[in-house]
Image (cartoon, helix red, strand yellow):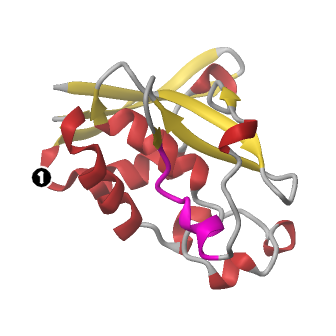
Amino acid sequence: MKVLQRNKYEGNKVIQTRTLTFEPYPYNQIELVIEKIKDNLSPDLLKGRKSLMYPSDLLTNKFYGHCYHSSQALYYLMDTDKLVPMSGKDYRSEVHWWLADEEKIYDATANQYLDKGQIPPYNEGKRSKWYGWKQRPHQSSLALTIRVLGDRLISDETSC
């Protein structure tokens, strides 16, 4: 069993905590989980992002704009401590996110590059910390995690 928490703050004080409790996927199922992530990507996960910030790929490429929450969801969904968040600037000078272990790269959104004949920026990558205050999971990451978990989700509770 795994527990994932996201606190909501008012100043430095925690005013609410959302807690997901679930059965993580075994590490040997990571490719299956990546496919589940791909199947569950949708524009609502990009809400709040202005289309002016993104090139036309946002409208034509299913994977564009989803690298961060896809990587963060994959990180939490797996039953392992081997995965490391990585990021690097791509050919547009935009930051791309993926996960790596000692031997392999895991990128649920690599097709945003491959479909355009481009190479993901793995050679520019470096170990990275998650965005946000106290590196808490993003709401989009939680939403995607819940979609992928299906009946592996034990509970989704919010407490004050």
Q: Amino acid at mark 1?
A: Asp
In this rendering, would 128 be left or right of 91? left
Q: Nearer the viewer, residue 46 or 88?
A: 88
Give x and y (percent) for residue 68: 59, 47
Residue drawn at x 14%, y 45% as measured from the top left: 152
Query: Furthest residue to the bottom?
Result: 60
Inspect the magenta stretch and tell me whether residue 93 lies in it. Answer: no
Circle count: 1
Dot 1 lies on which element? helix
Residue drawn at x 46%, y 55% as measured from the top left: 108
Q: Which quadrant of the figure has residue 62?
A: bottom right
Task: Answer yes or no: is residue 60 visible.
Answer: yes
User: Quick one: quadrant of the C terminus?
Assistant: top left
Residue placed under numbered mark 1 in the picture: 151
Q: Nearer the viewer, residue 114 or 99?
A: 114
Give x and y (percent) for residue 16: 48, 29
Residue drawn at x 30%, y 60% as measured from the top left: 36
User: Quick one: quadrant of the N terminus?
Assistant: top left
In this rendering, would 110 be left or right of 59? left
Task: Answer yes or no: is residue 160 visible.
Answer: no
Give x and y (percent) for residue 44: 53, 70
**Above or below — where is 45 with respect to 76?**
below
In this rendering, would 110 be left or right of 125? left
Q: Which quadrant of the figure has residue 156?
A: top left
Give the residues in magenta. Answer: 106-115
**Above or below — where is 117 with respect to 19?**
below
Query: Furthest residue to the top?
Result: 12
